[in-house]
Image (spheres, helix red, strand yellow):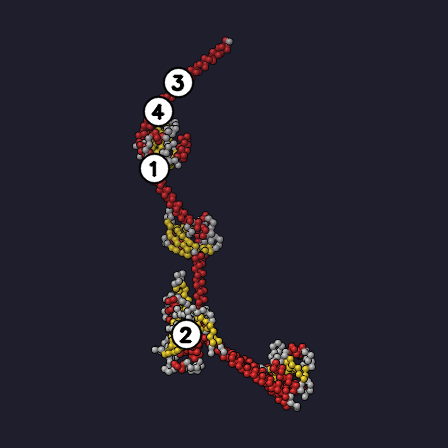
Amino acid sequence: MSGQKRIGKELDQLVADRTRELTEANEALKQELEVERQRTEAARRASDQDSRVIVGSMPGMVAILTPTGGIDAVNDELVEYSGRTLEELQQWGTSDTVHPDDLPRLIQIFTKAIASGEPYEVEVRLRRFDGAYRWFQDRAVPRRDASGAILRWYVLQTDIDDRKRMEDALRHSEASLRAIVETTPECVHVIAGDGTLLSVNAAGAAMAGASSVDLMLGRNFYDFVTPEDRERYRAFNESVCAGQKGVLEFHIFRMDGECRHLETRAAPLRNDDGTVAQLGVARDITTRKQAEARLRESERNLRQLTETIPVMLWSATPEGAIDYCNARFLEYTGFDAEEVMGRDGFTKVLHPDDVDRTVQEWLSCIRTGASFQVEVRTFHAADATYRWCMTNARPLLDEHGRILKWYGTVVDMHDWRQAQEELRHTQEELAHMMRVITMGELTASIAHEVNQPLSGILTNAGTCLRMLAADPPDVAGACDTARRTIRDANRASEVIVRLRALFSGKELTTESMDLNEATREVIALSMNELQRHLVMLRPELADDLPLVTANRVQLQQVILNLLRNASDAMVGVDDGPRQLLIRTERDKGDRVRLTVQDVGVGLEPGVVDKLFQAFYTTKSNGMGIGLSVSRSIIEKHGGRLWGEPNDGPGATFAFSIPRVPERTTDAAHVMRNS
Amino acid sequence: MVQRSLVSVVDDDESVRESLPDLLRQFGFAVQAFSSAEAFLASEFVSQTSCLILDIAMPAMSGPDLQQELTRRRQPIPIVFITAHGDTTVRPRLLAQGAAECLFKPFSDDALLEALTNALGTR
């Protein structure tokens, strides 16, 4: 035991000695540390004291933090700004002191900085006493002691709100501008003085057939311009870069090889580095140019058409002034355009006798907007004669029915008209021949009817003689044949009786009819002839005319006869218009009257009575039966036909016939003509 | 003059059929009268007829139609046409087509006799 015990005792003693030594050393260290701590504390306090003095006098908002991030102190400015106490500010991590949108970011940066001891800088919005947030730049810097341990954090908050807002506004306006440039359908580009494309918008890229802007940037724009236009474009670009604004039309080849027509408006753009580039806005005018070319082409075609068409064309203003005549018109009439243009220039090409009539009709059409149509003799330069032409015009109306323009044609009808005259002449001859043929047929049928019994008479008489001359005479047979002779003679006589009946007994069918309507039909039928005789017909047909009972065809024959007589009577009238008035009206005694008045040769006294005798005529080529037949027709209708000289020139003829009695039906009446 | 030759009369006019046969018999001919061309063709007298007195215009078959039919049947009978129509242009045409004569009504008994004599003489 003794050895072990001794070793044990020695060991215990050694441990106890080491322990005591350690304890003493530890105590000494403690005291040393305490001294050090107290010294550091004193130093920090001194430093804090210094800092607070500095901070308090700083013209910014400052916070001092402990090494672990707690707010130790803030200056007055921060308190004033926030309207909060130190204690309230110390709760910033969970309050609205920092803008909620910025708080998570700030906490992240702050936590990282405290952990790492690295300074940080961050832009956050801080709440002002009145609730408004302003942008601040927070800059936190740690202060360390000699050993590098962090003593305090200093955080300076600088108000950057105004700058921040300006930046936003700037960013916003730049964005707007960019948006405008990018969405404009026109090509906006910046081209350097040497042709390098510095900038272009999407529309510009599309215009050049590039799929993206990047494909174009940095390229020389001159390469896009067609070789024909390249030098012109280069000069233009250089002029703009020398400070001149300008406009240029030129062609480019797109990247796909298609040629386009562009128009650029450009102004000099001064860059930051002092160089000048061309700021240009280009638009693709290919379609417009093509449309313009097409329009020019179609105008040229139309002009060619109107100038080469073998028809005379003209147009006039709504007021009736001629404003265009085509080449054919001028060639035909031999006049210059200036001579026939205007309000009454066209009268120069008309036959003097046709001018008044044409002008009156033209003025009436301009007033009413009715289509214009006259047959008028027009001067024909080639043989210096007047030829009959048909002149037509129609108004072009706007959506309100106002006349915008008159368009007219002139067609030479002379040959046609002559052919018509010839045709009419031929027709008349034909009609005459028809009558002759009819007479021939009639004669043949009469001959046949008569020849049959005559033949029987001859045969029987011959037979009779032969029977009597026979030996012995056949008396009985001769008597038979003689009787047959008598019978055949009677047959011939009957034929004559039948023929007389055929030519005399005539029935007249009448109906209730409108005299105005019958008159209008006659006017329509004779219009051409009246125009040919240059007669101006003025109808005055009463609106309230009662019906009459008459044979329509016969009554129209009478009206036609009166119109022809009146027209014929005016053939010699050359010193004024050949006016013809046809009027219908009620007459006294339940009658209806039709009057035809001319300004012709009139009636000599004493002639009036003879007029109505058959075969009496004052005309060189008349039969003299018209008025006689007319009067007998009117008398058959229970009416009266008369004529009298006018007070002025000409004569008036009229008839008056009974109207249909009230409540008479429309049934056809048959009256017997004796 | 040839005796007892048969002359056939074809005419739609009854007065002709009444008067002509008596005259023809006075001339000494045998006579048959028919009211239409069809009636004549249907009779037994076609082949016995020495001469035909034929009206031109008849309601159904006309005189010239009958003439053509006889030619077609190869029975050429001399024909004296008679007509009440005054159209003289038909005569040369009918003569050209083989007719012996064409008489316009009214005709005299002597003219008829002469025509018949000529017609029968040409046979």
Q: Amino acid at mark 2?
A: Ile
Q: Are marks 2 and 1 on the same chain?
A: yes
Marks 4 and 1, the one that precedes in the sequence = 4
- Residue at point 37% right, 44% down? A170
Nearer-the-camera pick, A49 or A328: A328
Label 4, on which residue? Answer: A41
Label 1, on which residue? Answer: A132
Count of numbered tags: 4
SS label for mark 3: helix
Marks 2 and 4, the one that precedes in the sequence = 4
Q: Amino acid at mark 4?
A: Glu
Q: Are marks 3 and 4 in contact (CB under 8 Å)?
A: no
- Residue at point 37% right, 54% down? A245
Spatial separation of the CA atoms under disc 4 and disc 1: 40 Å
Spatial separation of the CA atoms under disc 2 and disc 4: 150 Å
Other-residue count near label 2 (Cα within 10 Å), few / some / many at <14 / 14–19 / ≥20: many
Spatial separation of the CA atoms under disc 2 and disc 1: 110 Å
* Nearest to viewer (mark 4 / mark 1): 1
Marks 3 and 4, the one that precedes in the sequence = 3
Q: Where is residue A515 drawn, in percent x and y?
A: 42, 71
Q: Are marks 3 and 1 in contact (CB under 8 Å)?
A: no
Q: Where is residue A347 drawn, in percent x and y?
A: 38, 72
* Nearest to viewer (mark 3 / mark 2): 2
Q: Which mark is residue A657?
A: 2
Q: Are marks 3 and 2 in contact (CB under 8 Å)?
A: no
Which chain does the numbered disc 1 sit on? Answer: A
Spatial separation of the CA atoms under disc 3 and disc 2: 165 Å
Label 3, on which residue? Answer: A27
Q: Amino acid at mark 1?
A: Ala
* Nearest to viewer (mark 3 / mark 1): 1
